Each structure stands twice: as structure tokens, then as C-alpha cells.
């Protein structure tokens, strides 16, 4: 069982988070119609959808709301699924690919709609750029933008040649790209905290510092056991993503936790910020191990780069990420680093989410593979809809292939390290 902590890990997000009420641990027995395990985007959106429909919901969070990937990520809200529409058309056919594209648009609308409806202050800023790190990817990016316009009616993307991109992102390290005006970025922890507040206003009971350690099936429903009590519920959602190991062996075999790392600099002057990203868009590049960055509301460079595949983080996270940042922005060499942190996300082999009914009344949603700001919350919402009797979206998402990682529990880690190291080498070459 992971150690329970009572504070968010050191990060820029924790340092600028809005205040939140104390949410005491579970103490004794509780009952609900639905027990949600996990206080990130998946669990919070599921709980909110259920509570707004009149269901009694108890949400259990091992540490604090937004403590995992939902409160530590790059804050980028992308269009589409984690795999592009060409892949989805080949793997599932054009009809299903179309539905998955529509779902991704619904996912963005869900995030932005709940931000607006619940007045969540999370620094939403539209605009996201995909930067091609190799010349041959420029034509691919442009062709994909044309495909989205022609086949999916998505006209929010414009292409950027090398000079236009350099003027837009303050570096000539890339060869061209696209700007997606329908995507953007935000403060991810404040989004999670705002969703939790909305949940409680709708009647959800949230217990922090309350890990689920065992599931026991009853004649009707389940008992979710914790160190200091249990919740009895007809339905249960496993929504812990990269922190879910041990509750379901099949989920463990198909969803793999990995670590990613981010830093923020000291605040830049307005003039310095305007030389870097004058339009304040977020940027992600075409590497397999993606570099992603943006300017925060207070004009810090927030830069994410580098992964590892072990249970521990690098000793010098700031130095680890700074090396990647300076290859793109050497002009920041003398800029002070104020925050550096890591977080655990979860991937699947196909990079598509694992959304399933594991058995009657027991659901899981995990494996968002870096697309969690949009797809994690939407997956939780879709599971909640299925619990409420509308399984149309759930049925489509539950058909997405997420095969087991090879090697079983003993060998899947070293096999993943070999595979990811190869892709990282391919990025450099």
C-alpha cells in the first residue's frame, strides 16, 4: 500500500493552488449507491455526473484530491484521442473512428462546460501548437490538419511554416507545425479542486487519506475496505489510473504506470515572455517522448520533458528537465528554476484508454497515456452514464483494444524500459 500523505507534492501547481476544505478520512462504515475510488479527473467527473442525477456517491482518495496525475500534469487540453484518426480508421473502421472523434470533442466541451458552469478559476487559455521536430513531419502535420477539415469538419487548425513557427514559439529548433485554436491549456490542480467543490455542492461525500485496500463482492454490490472502515455500494468505479495497482489483476496487466517530469522557471518579464510565446499558446512536439511547454499566468516557463520507468524519480529533477529545455531555449540558461516535480501517469500498449465493466457493478477507467485532461474526465462521465442506464458511449469505448503488456508482472517493467528506450533513441536519431 502506498504511503498516505497529507499535502500535495512540491510543485508550481501546489504553490498556486486555491484553498480547499479539510476532507477527513473515512471512519467506520458508510453506504452509498456508488463508491468511486480515486479523486482525480476520472473519479471527480464520474461522481459529479452521478450526483447531478440524484445518486448517493462516496468518493475515496488515497491522498488528496488531485494528488496524482490530475494535479501534476502539463495542463494541456488536446483535440482528438491519443491516437490519430488515421490509426483509428484502420483499427476500428471509419464509423467508429468518427464516433471517437466526436467523443473527443465532447470531452473538451465537458471540461470547458464544467469550468464555466461551476465558475472554476483554473487559468484557461485557448491555443495549442504541435511542433515538428523533424523535416519529414511537417508535411504529415499539414496533411493531418487537411484530413480533419475534410473528413471531420474540424476547421480550428492552421499550418505554420518554419519561420511562422519560430516567430510563434521563440525558437528555431523546429521545422514547422500546426496551431489548434480549439485546444488550449489550464492549471490542472485548480481544475481538480474546482471539480471537487462542485461534487460536494451536488451531494458527493469525499474522504481523503483513505486508500481502498480490498474489494469484497457481496450478494448485492461490494464492500470497499479501507484501513479505518468500509463503504458498501451497489456499484464501484476504479479510477486511480497509475495508482491503482493491486485492486484488480487484469487492470494491472494492461495499464502500466510511468513517470514524467516538469519544471517552472522564475517569472519572466513581459518583454521576455513575448519573445518566447507572444500568443500564450501551449506547445507539444512530435517526439515519441514528448516535450511540452507553455507560459503560466504569471509568465513562468513551464516545461515538461523526459520520462523514467522505475518506481523512483531522478534525484535532480530540475537538472533532468532543464537539459531538455535548454536544447530548445538556450536563452534560458541563466534563468532560475523555482519548481521541479514528477508525477505518475498510466499508459496502455495501444495508448487508448481502458474503460471496462469488469463484472456486474464493477467498472474501471484508466490508461489515458498523456491525454488525461480531456479523456480521463470524459471516461469517468461515460462510466457514470452507463451506471445511469445510458451505455451508448460506454459500449464504444469498452471495445477499444488494450492488450496485456508482455512478460507478466515480473517482466513487463524491463520489457517496457527496452521498448521506450528504443523510441527515445529514435527521437534523438
Image: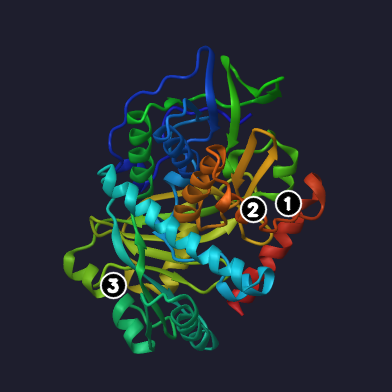
On the image, numbered disc 3 is attached to which residue?
276
160 left or right of 212? left
At horizontal 54% and vertical 88% (from top left) the residue drawn is: 136
For disc 3, the neighbor class at 10 Å (few under 14, some 14 to 19, many from 20) is: many
Q: CA distance from mark 3 to mark 1?
A: 38 Å
Single out the residue that lies furthest toward the front: 389
For disc 1, the neighbor class at 10 Å (few under 14, some 14 to 19, many from 20) is: some
Q: Height in image: 61 above or below 405?
A: above
Residue in front for this viewpoint, 25 or 115: 115
For disc 2, the neighbor class at 10 Å (few under 14, some 14 to 19, many from 20) is: some
- Do the residues under discs 2 and 1 have CB atoms within 8 angstroms? yes
Single out the residue that lies furthest toward the left: 270
Q: Which mark is residue 63?
A: none
Q: Is residue 404 visible?
A: yes
Q: Judging from the image, what secondary structure is the residue with disc 1 in?
A: helix
Name the quadrant of the C terminus: bottom right
On the image, numbered disc 2 is attached to which residue?
309
At horizontal 40% and vertical 41% (from top left) the residue drawn is: 10
Q: Height in image: 405 above or below 61?
A: below
Percent from the top left, x then y, of residue 110? 39, 52
Percent from the top left, x then y, of residue 395? 62, 52
Q: CA distance from mark 2 to mark 1?
A: 7 Å
Q: Judging from the image, what secondary structure is the residue with disc 2 in?
A: loop
- Do the residues under discs 2 and 3 have CB atoms within 8 angstroms? no
Q: Is residue 315 visible?
A: no
On the image, numbered disc 1 is attached to which residue?
413
In the rendered structure, which disc, 3 or 1, sits on the residue that comes first in sequence? 3
Q: Judging from the image, what secondary structure is the residue with disc 3 in?
A: helix
The quarter of the picture where residue 262 lies is bottom left
Residue in front for this viewpoint, 202 or 373: 202
In the rendered structure, which disc, 2 or 3, sits on the residue that comes first in sequence? 3
Q: Height in image: 68 above or below 146?
A: above
Amino acid at each position: 500500500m502506498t504511503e498516505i500523505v497529507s499535502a500535495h507534492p512540491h510543485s508550481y501547481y501546489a504553490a498556486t493552488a486555491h484553498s480547499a476544505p479539510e476532507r477527513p478520512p473515512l471512519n467506520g462504515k458508510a453506504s452509498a449507491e456508488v463508491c468511486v475510488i480515486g479523486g482525480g479527473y476520472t473519479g471527480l467527473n464520474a461522481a459529479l455526473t452521478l450526483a447531478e442525477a440524484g445518486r448517493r456517491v462516496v468518493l475515496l482518495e488515497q491522498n488528496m484530491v488531485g494528488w496524482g496525475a490530475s494535479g501534476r500534469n502539463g495542463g494541456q487540453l488536446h483535440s482528438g484521442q491519443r491516437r490519430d484518426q488515421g490509426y483509428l480508421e484502420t483499427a476500428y473502421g471509419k464509423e467508429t473512428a468518427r464516433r471517437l472523434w466526436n467523443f473527443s470533442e465532447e470531452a473538451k466541451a465537458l471540461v470547458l462546460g464544467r469550468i464555466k458552469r461551476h465558475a472554476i478559476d483554473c487559468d484557461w487559455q485557448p491555443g495549442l501548437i504541435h511542433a515538428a521536430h523533424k523535416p519529414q513531419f511537417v508535411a504529415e502535420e499539414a496533411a493531418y490538419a487537411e484530413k480533419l477539415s475534410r473528413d471531420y469538419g474540424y476547421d480550428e487548425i492552421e499550418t505554420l511554416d518554419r519561420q511562422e513557427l519560430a516567430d510563434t514559439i521563440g525558437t528555431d529548433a523546429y521545422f514547422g507545425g500546426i496551431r489548434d485554436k480549439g485546444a488550449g491549456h489550464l492549471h490542472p490542480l485548480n481544475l481538480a479542486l474546482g471539480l471537487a467543490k462542485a461534487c460536494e455542492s451536488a451531494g458527493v461525500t469525499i474522504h481523503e487519506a483513505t486508500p481502498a485496500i480490498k474489494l469484497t463482492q457481496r450478494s448485492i454490490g461490494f464492500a470497499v475496505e479501507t484501513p479505518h472502515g468500509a463503504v458498501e455500494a451497489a456499484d464501484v468505479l476504479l479510477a486511480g489510473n497509475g495508482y491503482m495497482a493491486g485492486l484488480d489483476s487484469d487492470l494491472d496487466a494492461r495499464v502500466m504506470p510511468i513517470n514524467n517530469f516538469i519544471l517552472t522557471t522564475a517569472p519572466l518579464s513581459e518583454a521576455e515572455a513575448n519573445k518566447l510565446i507572444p500568443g500564450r499558446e501551449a506547445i507539444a512536439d512530435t517526439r515519441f517522448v514528448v516535450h511540452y511547454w507553455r507560459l503560466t499566468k504569471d509568465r513562468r516557463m513551464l516545461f515538461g520533458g523526459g520520462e523514467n520507468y522505475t518506481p523512483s524519480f531522478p534525484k535532480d529533477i530540475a537538472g533532468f528537465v532543464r537539459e531538455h529545455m535548454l536544447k530548445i531555449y538556450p536563452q534560458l540558461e541563466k534563468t532560475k528554476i523555482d519548481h521541479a516535480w514528477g508525477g505518475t501517469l498510466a499508459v496502455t500498449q495501444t495508448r487508448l484508454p481502458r474503460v471496462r465493466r469488469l463484472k456486474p457493478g464493477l467498472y474501471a477507467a484508466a490508461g489515458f497515456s498523456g491525454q488525461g485532461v480531456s479523456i480521463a474526465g470524459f471516461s469517468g462521465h461515460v462510466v457514470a452514464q452507463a451506471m445511469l442506464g445510458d451505455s451508448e458511449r460506454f459500449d464504444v469505448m469498452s471495445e477499444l483494444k488494450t492488450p496485456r503488456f508482455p512478460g507478466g508482472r515480473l517482466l513487463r517493467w524491463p520489457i517496457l524500459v527496452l521498448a521506450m528506450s528504443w523510441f527515445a533513441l529514435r527521437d534523438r536519431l
